Amino acid sequence: MAAIRLERLSKYYGKARGVVEVDLEVQTGEVFGFLGPNGAGKTTTIRALLDLIRPSSGKATVLGLDSVADSLEIRKRVGYLPGELALWEWMTARQVLDHLANLRGGVDQAYREQLTERFEVEIDRKVSDLSTGNKQKIGLVQAFMHKPELIVLDEPTSGLDPLMQQVTYEVIDEAQRDGRTVFLSSHVLPEVERIAHRVAIIRKGRVIEVATVDSLKERAIRLVELRFGWPVPDPAQLAAIAGVTEASVSGSVATVRVEGSMDPLVKALAGYETLLIRTHDTPLEEIFLQLYRNGADDEG
Amino acid sequence: MRAETFRRVIVGRRKSVVGWSIAFLAMMAFIVLLYPAVRDQPSFSDLVEDYPEFVQQILGLGGGLDMTSPEGYLNSQLFANTLPILFLIYLLAFAVRETAGEEIDKTMNLALAHPIKRERFILEKFAAMTVTGFGLALVAIVGLLITGPLVDMDLGVAGYFGATLSVFLTALVFATLALAVGAWTGKRSLAYGVTATLAVVFFLVWGLAPIVDALEWTNVINPFFWGLAGTPVVSGLQVGNALLLAGVVVVLAAAAIAGFRRRDIGV
């Protein structure tokens, strides 16, 4: 069973676009990344899962339940960290967690305490005295503390220092090892690369790509640095090789961009004295930006 | 399941409620203790008699109430104006804060992602508003019962209770309307604007109705008429009117729930 299934989900705010005909399936037990820049529709999609907003058309199914008709049951079994987290300023962290736990009819106290310790939550300080990052930590604890089957995190590490980001990744990993599902949105790409198995990329309200992180990387353009003996090939000769999209030569060093398979390049290099081959994997960020630019071209 | 939202709202407002209670007590004492100054000046009555009927009515001295009598004094200084205004300020702010206010603050977003039905969420907030407002009404009654004997003013529990409860219910009608507008729209200024405007209009119309024949029919739909006519301070709680006010409150609360259920939150 899919943990989340979106079928042609659309949401308009008046005439303004939220998301348009989103189809998406998140499998039980996977960590799924939802990528896109601000305003692309990530938060809209997530809030529809929790019935905070209602689809204009299409359908969202969460844990096999209808997002509107069975919302109460869904909310029992889902943990949620809002993108723009707001907590009751007059409460202490402890009171916030007590209140939210009570809304659920109680949670496993031992696990809650373990989480507050790991996230180093300043439990008896007032929310109004806490920094953004410290509030975010309370938000993370409440999203995990009832051990939900599905955890939906909207920009989970925003405002966190690297140490706490690490704790967040660990807690996500543990949840996943327990067989629970994590759906997280982010515009921080290394984060998704680090923890997600699959990603969907959303742009201007439409999902433009769903792929595993590995396959995205395979499709990536690689930058290859080549050092030649004699003779050094012309840039034009290199650019003519299949898969090479760009080539430049400076002295005995050539730099080429290769898309897809390296095979044609390697075979062509057999005709030259090649002293050194150094490849640079494109970070996911580059892939993302590229998908993005392609999308922009489509539209233009 | 515990009424967790009710509890949270009450706890969050405990300081405010204590402050309001003190203000209510002080206001009751202030008004009551000034009574001898009016009582001993019969010329006040003559002065009021010369006022236009509209002004007499607005002052709470319609129907031949004498300002120097305890009933007339309290009605004109408290029940027909000061107390409704105090209740309106407290209850309207509460209603708007707990609907549109919390939605704008975005804490509602987190609360409603938890397993609580929207109807229950609004209902618990309505209950918190009503219970604390009723608490202030009790404070007012106690204030009158304590300070009255100091100036030989004793209208009895029935008079105090009837008048205070009627005024509270009248204000609660407008506050529940604010709750409904806040729940339907999520817009703070709209909730305040609509309700405050209606309250002022109904209050003025209540003053004009006895002298303008064309407005007489408005009494049928005017919460101020339901709350103040029959002069509860003289004759005790007007049960029919009180039930009518309570009925309208229930209908408006149901409207608040219906509006809130169908909405997108925080957009």
Image (cartoon, coloured by chain):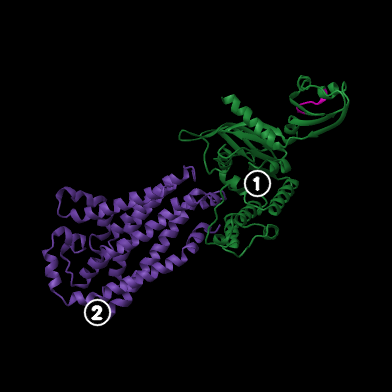
Could you say which quadrant of the image residue B142 lies in?
bottom left
Question: What is the secondary structure assignment of the residue under circle 2?
Answer: loop
- Disc 2 residue crowd, few under 14, some 14–19, many 20+, Cα 10 Å: few
- Residue drawn 55% across and 51% down? B110
Question: What is the secondary structure assignment of the residue under circle 1?
Answer: strand
Residue B213 visible to an observer of this rendering: yes
Q: For residue A117, which numbered disc appears in the image?
A: none
Q: For residue B152, which numbered disc appears in the image?
A: 2
Residue A244 percent coordinates (x, y) = 76, 24
- Residue drawn 34% across and 54% down? B174
**Residue annotated with mark 1:** A151
- Disc 1 residue crowd, few under 14, some 14–19, many 20+, Cα 10 Å: many
Query: Is B162 a magenta residue?
Result: no
Measured along the vertical axis of the image, is residue A45 above or below residue B2?
above
Query: Chain A in the picture: what colour?
Result: green
Q: Is residue A284 left or right of residue B41?
A: right
Query: Chain B in the picture: what colour?
Result: purple
Which residue type does callout 1 highlight?
Answer: Ile
Check the residue under mark 2 and report the chain it is in: B
Measured along the vertical axis of the image, is residue B131 above or below residue A259?
below
Query: How far apart in space, not on screen, are marks 2 and 1 (Cα)?
Result: 67 Å
Residue B134 percent coordinates (x, y) = 38, 64
Measured along the vertical axis of the image, is residue A86 above or below residue A66?
below
Residue B239 percent coordinates (x, y) = 29, 60
- Which range of residues does the magenta coloring cover? A255-263
- Residue drawn 64% across and 48% down? A156
- Residue drawn 76% across and 47% down? A177
Residue B161 percent coordinates (x, y) = 31, 68
Marks 1 and 2: in contact by CB < 8 Å? no
Q: Quadrant of the N terminus of chain B?
A: bottom right
